[in-house]
Image: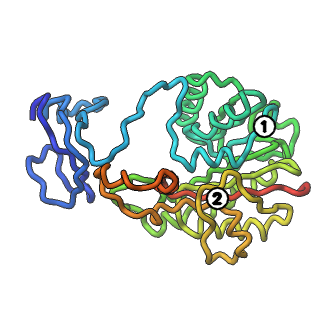
Amino acid sequence: MKAGDVTSVYSDIKGKCKKGAKEFDGTKVFLGNGISELSRKEIFSGVPELKGRGIRMTEPVYLSPSFDNVLPRYLFLQNLPSAVVTHVLDPQPGEKILDLCAAPGGKTTHIAALMRDQGEVIALDKISNKVEKIKQNALLLGLNSIKAFCFDGTKALKFDMVEKAEGNPPFLPESFDRILLDAPCSGMGQRPNMACSWTLKEVTSYQPLQRKLFTVAVQLLKPGGVLVYSTCTITLAENEEQVAWALRTFPCLQLQPQDPQIGGEGMMGAGLSFEQLKQLQRFDPSVVPSWDTDIDSLRDARIEDMIGLANKDCIGFFIAKFIKRKST
């Protein structure tokens, strides 16, 4: 293969293809055709810092154009549910907001934008290079209300007023008007995802961590404040079961209806009432029928039906909204 050659691109589902192989009969999925930007020799040169575009896709199997690096100072590309969750939080100008697990900062910057950059948005993440990414995104979008810290969210609560300087984590109880807990999760709702490599042990490891973070969030929230819990996974244990646990564990919390309500209601099986399930929001892409990628097959559909389908044909996601009725 030389630079400029027409090339077909496949995904190696099981990761069995050897580097530099000339033939491969393993499990693969066709992604489309493109034109190589580099020769085979350049691609397999062994240079570790080799980055960028190897194949310029000219005939991809999907219809969506690339929005990568389009107006980066004005646009931040997000999946639909990731944008919805910030509207459900409904941050207001002048408030103090905590994004407890914030990287890479898409929801953090959206919160600041909805507040018209008036108030204070605290973003925490325990991985330093991810925190730098949050700061870069805030700078790129010209948002000054965001303060990002490299800090473990499970340790974000303190009770000693002289322990640390004002404004830095950890924080005193009931310090925030609204809190977003977009919790670490098994990520089983992410798309596109060609293959699953999760183990049962890995999938079941997230529930205890989510509960630790949730407990901290409840204590950091002011009475009358709003707590939004979200994940990008589809398991009952990380979603509806966590809501049922939260309502049992924290009598001060009350489940709230959400606006906008674009996803479906919650899943049965966690002991929640039908009324409570209706107050949850679950995005489930499995309800969307498969379409032929030929655009002509969509021309007869009504606009309303197309919008409805597009709103559901997204990543798997879950949102729950609580209000803290009294002090803890």
Q: Nearer the viewer, mark 1 or mark 2?
A: 1
Point out the tag, 1 or 2, that comes first from the N-terminus.
Answer: 1
Identify residue type, mark 2: Gln
Nearer the observer, 169 or 139: 139
Looking at the rendering, in which quadrant would you find the C terminus?
Answer: bottom right
The residue that disc 1 covers is 92
What is the number of the mark on residue 221? none
User: In the image, residue 184 lies at what x, y percent?
Assistant: 57, 53
Identify residue type, mark 1: Gln
Q: Which residue is drawn at 53% across and 23% down?
A: 73
Q: Which residue is drawn at 54% across and 55% down?
A: 232
Callout 1: helix, strand or loop?
loop
Report the side of 169 relative to 22 (left or right).
Answer: right
User: In the image, residue 169 lies at what x, y percent?
Assistant: 74, 38
Q: Residue at x 71, y 63 (%)?
A: 279
User: In the image, residue 286 lies at what x, y percent?
Assistant: 45, 65
The residue that disc 2 covers is 210
User: In the image, residue 216 lies at what x, y percent?
Assistant: 75, 53
Report the side of 122 relative to 96 (left or right).
Answer: left
The answer to the question of whether label 1 and label 2 lie on touching residues, with beta carbons closer than 8 A, is no
Quarter where residue 195 is shown: bottom left
Callout 2: helix, strand or loop?
helix
Report the side of 211 relative to 187 (left or right).
Answer: right
